[in-house]
Amino acid sequence: METLNYRFENGTHHLTAPPEVVGVVGSGNLEVLIEPAALDGACSIEITTAAVGFGQIWEAVMRDFHQRWLLADTRISINDMGATPAVVSLRLDQAVQTMLGDAP
C-alpha cells in the first residue's frame, strides 16, 4: 500500500453539503469521501492505493480534477484498489456532483 498526499491552493468553489461517499472499494475500483473542511481555501487529497509506484499519474489526474472544479476548503480521501485514471476521474466528478445535488 502507498499513501499519496496532494494539496491545491487558490480554489474558488466552496462545497457546503454534508460529507458524501461514492464508489466501492474493490478490484479495479475505488471509494471517494468528499467533505467540506477549513483548509485556508485549499483542497487536500489523500490517496491510499494498492498500486504502488504511480505517483506521477495520480498527480496528473488530481491536477486535472482540480483545474476542472477549483475546489476550496475541501478534503478528499480516496481508497483505491487499482482503478484506471478514467475511473478515478469519473468517481471524483461523481463525488462533486453528488455534493452539488447534480448526480443522477
Image (tube, helix red, strand yellow):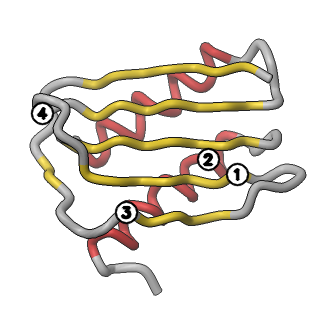
Q: CA distance from mark 4 to mark 1?
A: 26 Å
Q: Residues within 10 Å of mark 1 (few under 14, many from 20)?
A: many
Which circle marks residue 30 in the picture? 1
- Secondary structure under tag 4 reads loop
Looking at the image, which residue sits at the far right? 27
Left or right: residue 94 compared with residue 74 = right
Q: Residue 55 sits in which quadrant?
A: top right
Q: Residue 9 sits in which quadrant?
A: top left
User: Amino acid under label 2?
Assistant: Val
Q: Are marks 3 and 1 in contact (CB under 8 Å)?
A: no
- Secondary structure under tag 2 reads helix
Which tag is nearer the camera, tag 2 or tag 3? 3
Earlier-in-chain disc, 2 versus 3: 3
User: Amino acid under label 1?
Assistant: Leu
User: Badge 3 is on which residue?
Assistant: 19
66 relative to 27, above or below = above
Q: Are marks 4 and 3 in contact (CB under 8 Å)?
A: no
Task: Report the residue at 34% width, 54% height from top.
Answer: 35
Earlier-in-chain disc, 3 versus 1: 3
45 relative to 65, above or below = above
Q: CA distance from mark 4 to mark 3?
A: 17 Å
Which tag is nearer the camera, tag 1 or tag 2? 1
Which circle marks residue 41 in the picture? 4
Task: Report the residue at 16% width, 36% height from top.
Answer: 11
**Residue 86: image location, x then y, percent:** 65, 48
User: Badge 2 is on which residue?
Assistant: 88
Q: Residues within 10 Å of mark 4 (few under 14, many from 20)?
A: some
10 relative to 100, above or below = above
Earlier-in-chain disc, 1 versus 2: 1
User: Amino acid under label 3?
Assistant: Pro
